[in-house]
Image (cartoon, rainbow, N blue to C red):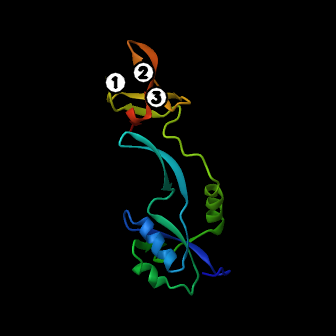
């Protein structure tokens, strides 16, 4: 789609778990879209992985002008609706989208799974189901937590796979 001074950004809501499908179909129809992503560490099946995740899960920014085929949006697989207020599609300010593009365009280190001060719960072993606080993360990616044992705080290191965010 060619850029025009009449082009505005809008926000599309996607159907549950169909954001990638919606993005693919919108691109195939020639729409200009933007969906900021981050790299994040997660634990899946006790394994620490780094994966790309949407900053705004379930939502995609789309650039449209008054001559765009707005009806095609509603028939696009994975698209639920245009975000509207008082029955009219809401324009997203250009500077907001440009700011997001600048913030999320740089190749960044993955968001850490745990950081000092996080509340975590131990998920395995003799301390299972105990909530504690992360003290530090070591260079070999072990998580040091503070445990109150016999009225004394002790620092104990755990593999990330044995902890989950508390709360």
Q: In this view, which residue lies farthest toward the bottom?
A: 67
Q: Which residue is mark 3?
A: 133
Neighbour class for label 2 at 10 Å: few (<14), some, many (≥20)?
some
User: Are the residues tagged 2 and 3 within 8 Å (C-beta)?
Assistant: no
Q: Quadrant of residue 2?
A: bottom right
Q: Which residue is mark 1?
A: 127
Residue 16 as seen in the image, left or right of residue 6: left
- Residue 158 visible in the shown view: yes
Whole-percent x, y for residue 110 in the image: 55, 46
Tell me the mark number nearer the camera, choosing from 1 and 2.
Answer: 1
Q: How many marks?
A: 3
Neighbour class for label 1 at 10 Å: few (<14), some, many (≥20)?
few
Rounded to the nearest angstrom, the CA distance separating label 2 from label 3 is 8 Å
Q: Counting residues from the N terminus, which is met first, the one under dot 1 or under dot 2?
A: 1
**Screen quadrant of the C terminus:** top left
Describe the element under mark 3 as helix, strand or loop. strand
Describe the element under mark 2 as helix, strand or loop. strand
Q: Nearer the viewer, residue 103 or 81?
A: 103
- Residue 83 visible in the shown view: no
Q: Residue at x 61, y 65 (%)?
A: 97
Q: Residue at x 46, y 28 (%)?
A: 133
Whole-percent x, y for residue 106 in the image: 65, 54
Instruction: Please say if 147 is above or below 120.
Output: above
Q: Which residue is mark 2?
A: 147
């Amino acid at each position: 789609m060619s850029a025009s001074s009449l082009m505005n950004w809008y926000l599309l809501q996607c159907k549950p778990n169909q954001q990638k499908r919606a993005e693919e179909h919108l691109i195939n129809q020639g729409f200009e879209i933007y969906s900021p992503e981050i790299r994040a560490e997660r634990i899946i099946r006790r394994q620490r992985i780094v994966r790309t995740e949407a900053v705004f899960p379930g939502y995609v920014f789309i650039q449209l002008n008054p001559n765009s085929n707005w009806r095609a949006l509603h028939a696009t697989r994975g698209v639920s609706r245009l975000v509207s207020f008082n029955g009219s599609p809401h324009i997203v300010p250009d500077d907001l989208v440009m700011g997001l593009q600048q913030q999320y365009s740089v190749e960044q280190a993955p968001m850490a799974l745990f950081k000092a001060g996080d509340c975590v719960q131990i998920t395995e072993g003799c301390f299972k189901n105990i909530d504690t606080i992360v003290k530090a993360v070591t260079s070999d990616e072990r998580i040091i937590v503070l445990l109150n044992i016999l009225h004394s705080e002790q620092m104990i290191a755990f593999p990330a796979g044995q902890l989950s965010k508390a709360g």
